[in-house]
Amino acid sequence: ELHQLKWMTVEEIAEMIADEHPQMMAVVLSFLDPEVAGAVLQRLDTALQDDVVFRVATMGVISVDAVADIKALLSRQVQKPGVAMASRAGSASDAAAIMNNVGKSAEQRIIKALIRRDKEMARAIEEEMLVFADLIGLEEKSLGTLLRSIENPVLLLAIKGAEPELAQKMFKCMSKRAAQSIQDELAEMAPVSKDDVVLAQKQIVAMARLLAEEGTIILGGQSDDFV
């Protein structure tokens, strides 16, 4: 583990890797906490940001040579002896975790650039950025708007497989009549396929993204739109 990085500020890390190859930037970001990595990413050259995110998502297991390069980079930056580092692998979920900690404008710009580069990978990162369970973080107004946009059969399946806390929040965001109707149907509902539940939940997440893009609801990671 790169213990030295824990003692460096976001600005120091960004400055340290500013002139490095995007692959080195990606490797360093993959070892940071997502919140820190997101802040560092936003301080890098905007022309490189999508490339760095793409490399985080696709790098796989970090090579011994890359580890040596990072140690050399850190030894030039801080006056501490090198420490052992465990193997690490980048993935779409790592890239998504970083993306979840950049503002809305940066997120949209980077995703658009990633789509031009590799549409499949961009979508994989997007899927990791927002999952059904994350909907519990929506404000009640946004969640209510989202639920009213979903057809009843899809909503039933999704709630059938939802965690109790999320299901209760969803009921709270519906009218009393609608919530009672859904609860009654769920009580009489036969067992359903897990695949059907997952598909329904993905449909709701896709609708959430669409409504967010239209500005109809607010998702997480959009705080730079407000003061």
Image: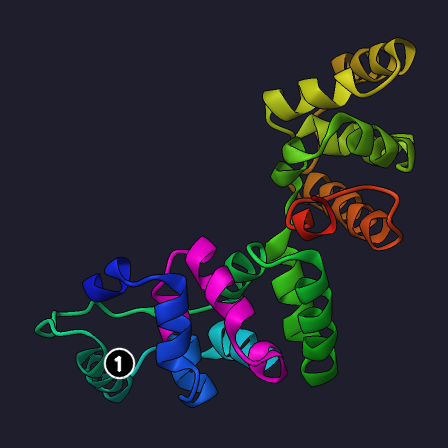
Residue depicted at x 88% and y 44%: 216
Residue 109 visible in the current orientation: yes
Q: Residue at left 52%, top 78%? A: 52
The residue lying toward the viewer, choosing from 26 and 152, is 26
* Residue 74 shown in magenta: no
Q: Which residues are magenta?
A: 28-49
**Position of 210 relative to 148 (above/below):** below
The answer to whether residue 129 is above or below residue 159 is: below
Instruction: Answer left or right for 58 relative to 148.
Output: left
Q: Residue at x 89, y 16 (%)?
A: 178
Q: Is residue 190 left or right of residue 73?
A: right
Residue 103, image x and y in percent?
64, 57
Secondary structure found at label 1: helix
Q: From the viewer's perspective, tell me whether residue 19 is left or right of residue 182.
A: left
Q: Amino acid at mark 1?
A: Ile
Position of 151 with respect to 13 (left or right) is: right
Q: Is residue 93 visible?
A: no
Q: Position of residue 199 (x, y in %)?
A: 74, 47
How many marks the image carries: the answer is 1
User: Which quadrant, please, contains the N terminus?
Assistant: bottom left
In the rendered image, residue 189, in percent from the top left (x then y), is placed at 77, 20
Q: Quadrant of residue 28?
A: bottom left
- Residue drawn at x 77%, y 42% as measured from the top left: 218
Image height of 118 relative to 207, above or below = below
Classed neighbour count for the residue bearing mark 1: other residues with Cα under 10 Å, few (<14), some (14–19), many (≥20): some
Q: How is the image coloured?
A: rainbow
Name the residue that disc number 1 marks.
Answer: 70
Q: Main secondary structure of the magenta part?
A: helix
